[in-house]
Image (cartoon, rainbow, N blue to C red):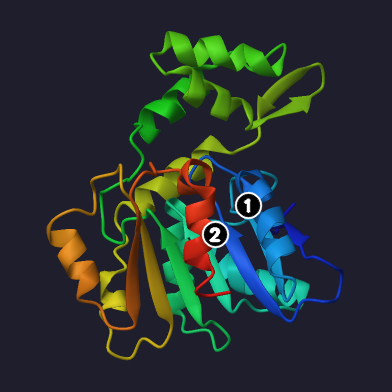
Amino acid sequence: MNHLSFEILEAEAGSAHRTAFLLHGILGSRRNWASMGRRLAKSYPDWRFVLIDLRGHGDSHGLIGPHTIESCADDLISLCSEIGHTPSLVIGHSFGGKVALAYGRRQPEALQAIWSLDSPPGVDTIASGISIDRVIDTARSAPTPLSHRLAAVPHFEEAGYDRSVASWMTTNLKRSGDGFVWRFDLDVIEELLNDYRQDSLWSFLEDPDRRVTVNFLLAGRTTWWRGPVQDRLMALDRSFVHELSEAGHWVHIDDPDGLVQALSTSL
């Protein structure tokens, strides 16, 4: 495969008039948005929701490098041509939030709003409370192919991760022959992660010529945004800051009702 894998959710085929792209975080896939996507499609029948596997994740493989945030934005532009729809709204969680901003940086004509869900727009910071680098190392050391999907759980628990993280990682396994292997490409993901840490979107956000509205949804149980970053976010024009006070980094899991209520302002 040399293009993005995706799934389109809409209440009734052909009934939607507007399009929203939903982007997952690092080491995730479009499956992370499945429940929320179905809920949104049911609640907002005028919209089609496109759940996307970013390059190196899920079933999106074989795309030519370099593997960067900007390349991910290029992929979204190519996807628009493939499906014949351009998004009015892009919603991105964590790593996907920065990809959403990079897409918006292109000033696409149809784009009206971006939602960046617990996603730092600057460099170095990762909102997740777990060490992504150590997760990658632990995934690399797993004795794949695994005999069964749940065999990944003790492997991660022995490395010091709790059951929730270990169980989450099993969703990234796929059957291959008589066993299970990782669905993602760890080499691509490491390259994406390195670029993520170097690509700042502040210049786009603070550009007086920016047309698209940007909404930042902050998780109350994360800390990256507190202090000077919050002040900088609050000072932006054509932007809004929302907080889900009881949610952790995975806001669509921790507070789905609060997320839907927040997104309703753009739907």
**Nearer the observer, 208 or 238:** 238
Separation of marks 2 and 1 at Cα, in angstroms:
8 Å
Identified by mark 2, the residue type is Val
Q: Secondary structure at mark 1?
A: helix
Q: Secondary structure at mark 2?
A: helix
- Whether residue 221 is situated above or below residue 41 in the rendered picture: above
Residue 61 appears in the rendering: no
Q: Which residue is mark 1?
A: 36
Considering only order in the chain, which callout, 1 or 2, is on the residue closer to the N terminus? Answer: 1
Taking the view exactly as shown, the residue that stands out farthest to the left is: 228
Residue 228 lies in quadrant = bottom left
- Say which residue appears at 60% left-offset and 57% top-offset: 64
Q: Position of residue 8 (x, y in %)?
A: 76, 62
Q: Tell whether label 1 touches label 2 (CB within 8 Å).
A: yes
Position of 220 compared to 58: left or right? left
- Say which residue appears at 47% left-offset and 64% top-offset: 262
Taking the view exactly as shown, the residue that stands out farthest to the right is: 13
**Nearer the observer, 235 or 60:** 235
Pointer 2 local density, CA inside 10 Å: few below 14, some 14–19, many at least 20: some
- Say which residue appears at 80% left-offset and 65% top-offset: 11
Closest to the camera, between mark 2 and mark 1, is 2
Q: Which mark is residue 260?
A: 2
Q: Which mark is residue 69?
A: none
Residue 35 appears in the rendering: yes
